[in-house]
Image: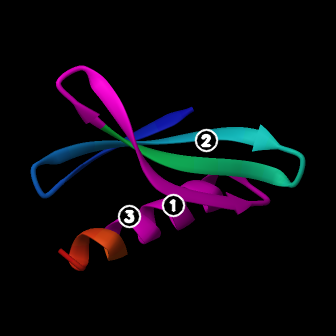
Amino acid sequence: MAKQLDLKGRRFWILSEPNEFGWKARVVEMKDGSKDEVGIEATAETRAAADDAAERKLRRLLQAY
C-alpha cells in the first residue's frame, strides 16, 4: 500500500508493508521517474500508525530546510 504526498514542490511516497512486529513504513521521493530513498522509516502495530509516523518524520525533516 502506498500514500502520495506533495510537499514543498516535491513528490513523496510512503510505502508500507507488514513485518514481524506489525507494519513498517518508509519514505521515497519520486524524481523524473526514478525513486530516491529518503532514509525515513517507522514501525507500528497498524499500517495507518506506521504511515502517520513516517509522514510526521518527513514533515519535521522538511521544516528544518
Tag 3: residue type? Leu
Label 3: state its secondary structure.
Answer: helix
| Category of crowding for the residue at label 2, using alpha-carbon neighbours closer than 10 angstroms: few (below 14), some (14–19), many (at least 20) | many
Q: Which residue was labeled with disc 2?
A: 16
Residue type (three-letter) at the residue carrying disc 2? Ser
Q: Position of residue 50 (x, y in %)?
A: 63, 58
**Residue 34, numbered circle:** none
**Farthest top residue in view:** 33
Is 52 magenta? The answer is yes
Where residue 64 appears, x then y in whole percent? 24, 79
Q: Secondary structure at mark 1?
A: helix
Query: In 3D space, how far apart are the residues under numbered discs 1 and 2 (Cα atoms)?
Result: 10 Å
Is 63 located above or below residue 12 in the figure? below
Q: Residue at x 35, y 30 (%)?
A: 35
In the image, what residue occupies the spot 74% across and 49% down? Answer: 23
Asked if the residue at tag 1 contacts the one at tag 3, i.e. Cβ–Cβ closer than 8 Å, the answer is: yes
Q: Is residue 63 left or right of residue 18?
A: left
Which label is found at residue 54?
A: 1
Q: Quadrant of residue 55?
A: bottom left
- In the picture shown, does residue 40 fall above or below 9? below
Q: Residues within 10 Å of mark 3 (few under 14, many from 20)?
A: many
Q: Which corner quadrant of the image does residue 21 belong to?
A: bottom right
Please tell me which residue lies in front, 36 or 43: 36
Q: Which residues are magenta?
A: 30-59
Farthest right residue in view:
20
User: Dot 1 surroundings within 10 Å: few (below 14), some, or many (20 or more)?
Assistant: many
**Mark closer to the chain start, 2 or 3:** 2
Q: Which residue is mark 3?
A: 58
